[in-house]
């Protein structure tokens, strides 16, 4: 998922984008909640005011996300959410940003956001991250297609608005699957967008538990249904760029089917906030170094300061976990190899990554790793979060 700090309006600006080179170090700042708007019975849109002094830190491109940090029941909780609207000026030198939070069963933060979060609350918000952004150099006449499920619609909202506004000839097709109409997030917003761009925005709602007029759009979006849709409604040969966001199984299915029908992977962008598996490390786990045991020396460069920590070989500790023991300000969010917030570059030594759902192939080639998923394979490593 690289951060682009580049204007989003002219197509020419997009030509300068380099996914790996334009990231910036993730940092938390405390922002005030300005509005909490219900979207469905279990989803809300949360908006924040960005003061003038921090406006530059919160420049972002549609499709990116932020991590939120709060303390609930004595526990530090971090969650990542896509930005659902382009930056919106709200006053002299100020701006706002918005995320959509859907309640997960048993979810600590999402339940709190639904039941207790109100305007005026202060929350730590990380500067925008992510490479789930358009890589098209030329938008005139381009056709972009997106497949989303549930809360996967969130980044699509800002992407669709941006791409349709940036060029009078860009087309955007959205295949959006939910259980029922009442579960559709941004239902009215999508209708308004369709009214504004009636010929250039195409919406296909697939409902798994509600009968629609078209049989093809009624039922679960499985492989057979997806293939039929690609044969009759969204012809891959007409699409220049694809965006996928939803549960791991659906995104994986879409990528596999698109590849089989001839879509090159470089034209498919996908984003996950969960793989369906609970991360083994939500925060730093306690690790102690016993006298005489074999260790790995890990050197960390962060904010221009170098720190060193010894990690027991037998502990199989991640680089992130070790870093947090000496630098609690080390950036991370999901700890599951999904969001990319803990990204750093290995300058010396070697590591192996357990999972990677966030880094682009060119980033890996240049030595970047997800430190939450990285384990040293040499006696000494040096990782740089500032590169």
Image (cartoon, rainbow, N blue to C red):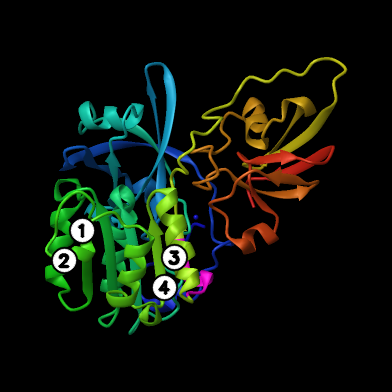
Q: Of the numbered discs in the image, which one, if any, rests on residue 85? A: none
SS state under label 4 = strand
Tell whether label 4 touches label 2 (CB within 8 Å).
Answer: no
Q: Of the numbered discs in the image, which one, if any, rests on residue 218? A: 1
Q: CA distance from mark 1 to mark 4?
A: 26 Å
Across and down, in percent, residue 175 comes to 28, 63
Q: Is the residue 136 above or below the residue 384 in the image?
A: below
Q: CA distance from mark 3 to mark 4?
A: 20 Å
Pointer 4 local density, CA inside 10 Å: few below 14, some 14–19, many at least 20: many
Q: Nearer the viewer, residue 120 or 69?
A: 69
Nearer-N-terminus badge (3/1): 3
Q: Which residue does the image show at 19% across and 40% down from the upper left? A: 35
Residue 168, located in which quarter of the rendered image?
bottom left
SS state under label 1 = loop
Q: Which residue does the image show at 14% across and 46% down from the upper left? A: 182
Q: Nearer the viewer, residue 278 or 37?
A: 278
What residue does disc 4 label? 241
- The stretch of residues the image draws in magenta is 263-269
């Amino acid at each position: 998922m690289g951060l682009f700090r580049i204007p989003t309006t002219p197509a020419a600006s997009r030509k300068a984008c380099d996914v790996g080179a334009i990231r910036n170090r993730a940092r938390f700042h405390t922002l005030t909640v300005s509005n909490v708007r219900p979207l469905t019975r279990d989803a809300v849109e949360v908006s924040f005011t960005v003061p003038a002094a921090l406006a530059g830190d919160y420049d972002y491109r549609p499709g990116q996300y932020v991590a939120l940090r709060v303390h609930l029941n004595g526990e530090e909780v971090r969650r990542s959410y896509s930005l659902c609207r382009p930056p919106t000026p709200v006053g002299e030198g100020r701006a706002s940003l918005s995320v959509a939070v859907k309640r997960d069963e048993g979810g600590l933060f999402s339940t709190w956001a639904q039941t207790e979060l109100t305007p005026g609350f202060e929350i730590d918000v990380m500067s925008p991250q992510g490479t789930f952004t358009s890589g098209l150099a030329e938008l005139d006449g381009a056709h972009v297609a997106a497949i989303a499920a549930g809360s996967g619609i969130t980044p699509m909202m800002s992407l669709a608005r941006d791409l349709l506004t940036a060029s009078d000839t860009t087309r955007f097709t959205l295949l959006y699957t939910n259980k029922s109409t009442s579960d559709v997030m941004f239902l009215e917003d999508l209708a308004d967008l369709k009214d504004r761009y009636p010929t250039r925005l195409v919406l296909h709602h697939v409902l798994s538990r509600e009968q629609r007029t078209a049989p093809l759009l009624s039922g679960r979006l499985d492989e057979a249904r997806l293939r039929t849709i690609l044969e009759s409604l969204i012809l891959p040969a007409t699409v220049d760029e694809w965006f996928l966001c939803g549960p791991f199984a659906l995104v994986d299915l879409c990528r596999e089917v698109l590849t089989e029908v001839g879509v090159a992977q470089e034209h498919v962008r996908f984003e996950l906030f969960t793989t369906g598996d609970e991360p083994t490390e939500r925060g730093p786990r306690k690790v102690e170094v016993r006298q005489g045991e074999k260790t790995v020396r890990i050197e960390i460069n962060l904010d221009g300061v170098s720190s060193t920590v010894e990690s027991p070989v037998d502990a199989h500790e991640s680089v992130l976990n070790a870093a947090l023991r000496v630098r609690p300000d080390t950036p991370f969010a999901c700890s599951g190899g999904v969001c990319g917030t803990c990204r750093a570059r290995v300058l010396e030594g070697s590591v192996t990554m357990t999972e990677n759902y966030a880094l682009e192939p060119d980033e890996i080639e240049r030595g970047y790793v997800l430190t939450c998923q990285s384990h040293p394979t040499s006696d000494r490593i040096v990782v740089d979060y500032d590169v």
